[in-house]
Structures are given as structure tokens and as C-alpha cells.
Image (cartoon, helix red, strand yellow):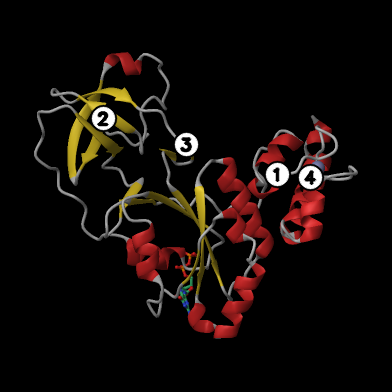
């Protein structure tokens, strides 16, 4: 736990307030009753009186309300792994965190290689996932990333060697905020801590310092419906002939028709089929 000796550090407009948790909130006796990233309300005497509903939560490290997950890869060295991009997108949706994709080390490739990568990742548009090409060594594209994640909580993921530390060094603030004047009014603020779970960004906002999202594994998807729900682009207007269609072998499948027409990317549909086969043989059949 990142609280220090029972203190919680709440940030409001660049100031940090040392607070305690009101007894009623402790009652649940759970270590996640108030955690890093929580949006809270605190009173004059600096007790946290309310924890607002979370939009998401991850457990290692324990952080709530993450706005973005950066899925970072490098153009080469190590080589771009398209399958793993899809696995990480799936994980982002599973944890209900909006993904964006960064391709680093573009100083090592040509303009036409960038076009080729864009082509290979054309399906990101339908998913509303933004794509950034950067070079940390040449300082290309860093400002765009910086303003995108400004004032937000962002986690970074991706394989090692792609330049995550390098980009975090550019984005991160080197001096931490001072403890500010305490305020007498009831305030709302983001819960942060003195421990280094969240690192301040230069422009405001935070990154999570433990890049937890590097998984090569599929998340704990329990059944085929849950898998389908992690492919937002499969929600087409047309109905499948069978209401319980799982879009694999059924006739009259609206998703397969959309793939045929090119409205759903073939790569994404094939990735879905690979996930389905893998989960079915390795997990669901064993339940
Ligand atoms: P991490 O494992 O993802 O944290 O990656 P690092 O930040 O440690 O970087 C791995 C290697 O890639 C280091 O040797 C960096 O110098 C190199 N590197 C990082 N960013 C770039 C870049 O934009 N261009 C080039 N050519 N090399 C880079
Ligand atoms: Zn179908």
C-alpha cells in the first residue's frame, strides 16, 4: 500500500494535502477502500469523507482511474510484434482503460516504412485508437504525446527494449511538488501519495511507474460473449441470423459478412478466431 503511516496525500490544483481516512471508510477492512488514483472528498479537518466511484482499477500496482494505457513498441530493434499489439489492446479493453499506441525509434526507419506500419495498423481507426510515431533520441513526436496525456493518469506497457524508460525520462518532471498550504474548505481532489507509484509529468498529470502492461497472455476472459465484447468493432447494425451467434461458424453471421465487405478488418477478425481457439482449448474446456 502506498499510503504512509495511515496518511493519504490528496492533490488539488498542484497542492498536496495530508489527510486521514475517516473511520466509516475504513470499516470495510479492505486494503482497496481508498487507493492511489482515487477521486476523493475531504473535510476541513483533513479527513477523507468520500471515495468516488472508480472507472477502472489495476492491482499491480494498485491504482484506480487510469485514463490511458500507452502500448509502446519500436519500429525495429526489437521488431514490431503485431500480434502482441492486439493482445495488449485486448488487455486494455478488459481493464476498461483507453489505449493509445506509440511506435518509437522512427529515426531508424524510412518514411515509406512508416506508411507501411500505418497500413498494417489501419484497423485502429475503427477502434478510435490514436497512433503516434516518435523517436526519443531525436525528440520527434514527444510533444504530441506529452500534450495528449497532460493532466491524465497514464500507464505504459510494451515489451522491454522499445524505449519506455527513455520516453518516461523525457515526459517526467524531475522535481516533485512541494507540500502546499492546507485549505480549509471541503475539496475534491485526486488521491496521490508520497510513494512513487505515480510520477508527475512535466505538463501535469501522472504516469504509473511500474509498466505492468507487457503481457503476452490473454486476460481472464471467462466465456465467448466476454471475448466478443472486447471487440467493439463487431457491434454492427445488422443482426446475425441466430441471436446466440458467436461469429465463428454460423450461417447468416453479420460479423462475417462485414468482414467480407471489408467493414471489419480481416486481421482483427482472424485475431478474434485465434483468441477463441486458444481460450477454448486452453481454458474454457478445462473448466
Ligand atoms: P525499455 O526497456 O522499454 O525501458 O527501453 P529503454 O528506454 O531502456 O531503451 C532500450 C534501448 O533503445 C536503449 O539502448 C536506448 O538507447 C534505445 N532507444 C530508445 N529510444 C530510441 C530511439 O528513439 N531511437 C533509437 N535509435 N534508439 C532508442
Ligand atoms: Zn454472428
User: Which residue extends farthest front?
Assistant: 238
Q: Earlier in the sequence, mark 3 or mark 2?
A: 2
* Drawn side of residue 228 relative to residue 85, left or right: right
Secondary element type, mark 3: strand
C-alpha distance separating marks 3 and 1: 31 Å
The residue beneath circle 1 is 237
Q: Is mark 2 within 8 Å of ligand 1?
A: no
C-alpha distance separating marks 2 and 1: 54 Å
The residue beneath circle 4 is 276
Q: Position of residue 94 (x, y in %)?
A: 59, 41
Mark whose residue sits in front, 2 or 1: 1
C-alpha distance separating marks 3 and 2: 23 Å
The residue beneath circle 3 is 57
Residue at image position (70%, 46%) is 236
Mark whose residue sits in front, 4 or 2: 4
Mark whose residue sits in front, 3 or 1: 1
The residue beneath circle 2 is 5
Amino acid at each position: 500500500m502506498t499510503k504512509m503511516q495511515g496518511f493519504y496525500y490528496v492533490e488539488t490544483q498542484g497542492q498536496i494535502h495530508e489527510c486521514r481516512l475517516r473511520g466509516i471508510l475504513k470499516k470495510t477492512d479492505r486494503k482497496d477502500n481508498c487507493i492511489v488514483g482515487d477521486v476523493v472528498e475531504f473535510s476541513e479537518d483533513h479527513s477523507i469523507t468520500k471515495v468516488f466511484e472508480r472507472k477502472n482499477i489495476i492491482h499491480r500496482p494498485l491504482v484506480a482511474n487510469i485514463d490511458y494505457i500507452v502500448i509502446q513498441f519500436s519500429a525495429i530493434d526489437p521488431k514490431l510484434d503485431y500480434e502482441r499489439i492486439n493482445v495488449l489492446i485486448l488487455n486494455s479493453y478488459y481493464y476498461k482503460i483507453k489505449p493509445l499506441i506509440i511506435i518509437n525509434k522512427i529515426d531508424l526507419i524510412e518514411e515509406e516504412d512508416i506508411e507501411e506500419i500505418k497500413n498494417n495498423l489501419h484497423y485502429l481507426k475503427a477502434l478510435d485508437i490514436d497512433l503516434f510515431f516518435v523517436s526519443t533520441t531525436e525528440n520527434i513526436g514527444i510533444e504530441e504525446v506529452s500534450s495528449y496525456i497532460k493532466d491524465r493518469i497514464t500507464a505504459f506497457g510494451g515489451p522491454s527494449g522499445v524505449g519506455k524508460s527513455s520516453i518516461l525520462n523525457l515526459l517526467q518532471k524531475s522535481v516533485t511538488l512541494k507540500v502546499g498550504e492546507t485549505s480549509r474548505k471541503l475539496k475534491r481532489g485526486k488521491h496521490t501519495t508520497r510513494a512513487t507509484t505515480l510520477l508527475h509529468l512535466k505538463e501535469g498529470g501522472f504516469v504509473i511507474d511500474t509498466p505492468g502492461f507487457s503481457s503476452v497472455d490473454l486476460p481472464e476472459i471467462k466465456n465467448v460473449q466476454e471475448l466478443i465484447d472486447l471487440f467493439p468493432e463487431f457491434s454492427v447494425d445488422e443482426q446475425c441470423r441466430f441471436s446466440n451467434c458467436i461469429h465463428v461458424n454460423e450461417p447468416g453471421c453479420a460479423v462475417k459478412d462485414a468482414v467480407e465487405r471489408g467493414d471489419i478488418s480481416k486481421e482483427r477478425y482472424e485475431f478474434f478466431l485465434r483468441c477463441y481457439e486458444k481460450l477454448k482449448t486452453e481454458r474454457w474446456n478445462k473448466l
